[in-house]
Amino acid sequence: MSQIIPTYALYGESDAFPDLLHCEEITDRASLHDWQIAPHRHPNLHQIFVLLGGQAQIRVDGIHQIPALPFVLSVPRGAVHSFTFAQGTQGFVLTLPVSEFPAAFGESSALRTRLSAWGTAPLSEAVRDTVLAISAEHHGEARDRAVMLHARAIQLLCHVARGLPDTVAPTSIDKHMERFDAEIRSHLRDHWTLKDYSAALMITPTHLNRITRQSVGLSAARYIEARLFHEACRLLAYTRMGVAEVGYTLGFNDPAYFSRAFRRHTGQAPSAYRARFNPPEQA
């Protein structure tokens, strides 16, 4: 019997998150799981692991390594990865939504080829210092936090890409996924069907499903839905739109239906989700 690989929207979680990126220490997550992270993958997220001290056994897409520390590991979306850490291993995990960083992951990016395949490299001082700066900014509340985080993340990805070996050109699956992502960005609010997207890509719905399952571990329909409700999460967290307005903006004609669909996808009502990131002011 083949092993079922869990697919996560966020490192260790099953729901979407609205922040520009996520940064945490290895100990924050690994210590809760006896220093072992089971095989899993993320359909929309690129991760950078910076290991500073201890030991880590890594397995990515079936390849096992025990790199000499300190090192940096780049894991593209869809790659199946797992870890066994020595107790007390120190380092950071940076999680980046691919759609938020077209300068690094977009079709015209000079970094795209090197970041499209997983790889490790010795840790440079530039990478270490940039990750530390991102961690401090991420956990702070300074003005223009999102702008600074975006700038720091691009800086980090440039440093990481410089250290990674050259990789082969993107595969036909990579290219189809890039085109699919572009069509979703353009028509997310039009509620295009799978048939609409496959027609725009000039491939069959069956072939599009095969591509998305191989690339990110989801059916094409589930991938479209995940992108739609990720955008809903962002609008609820970062704008002052009312819940009904968010629904209308995303092409839902019935606010009640939008609320039910949002709850079904995230496990929370839109108002409860918003309250997690916008707590009411104290009187």
Image: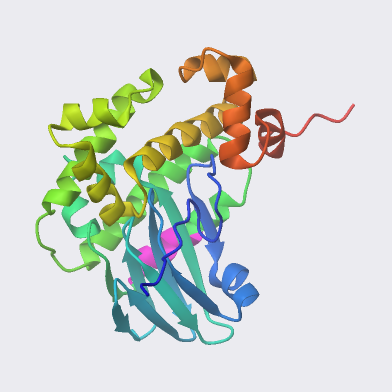
Relative to the observer, which residue lies in front, 281 or 247?
Answer: 247
View extreme (left): residue? 169
- The quarter in which the C terminus is drawn is top right
Kindly tell me whether residue 110 is visible in this rendering. no
Above or below: residue 6 compared with residue 251: below
**Residue 212 picture location, percent across and down:** 28, 48
Using the rendered view, name the quadrant where residue 67 is placed: bottom left
For the point 25% across and 25% down, the residue is: 196
Is residue 53 within the magenta segment?
Answer: no
Residue lying at 60% horizontally and 37% vertically, measured from the top left? 264
In screen coordinates, is 250 left or right of 87?
left
Whether residue 241 sits left or right of residue 118 in the image: it is right
Q: Is residue 130 magenta?
A: yes
- The reply to whether residue 281 is visible in this rendering is yes
Q: Nearer the viewer, residue 217 or 164?
A: 217
> Which sits in the foreground, 66 or 71?
66
- At a point 36% along the width and 72% down the height, the residue shown is 2
Image location (x, y in percent) of residue 40: 43, 65
Residue range in magenta is: 124-132
Percent of width and height locating residue 165: 17, 69
Residue, x 19% and y 50% (percent of image)? Answer: 174
Q: Quadrant of residue 120?
A: bottom left
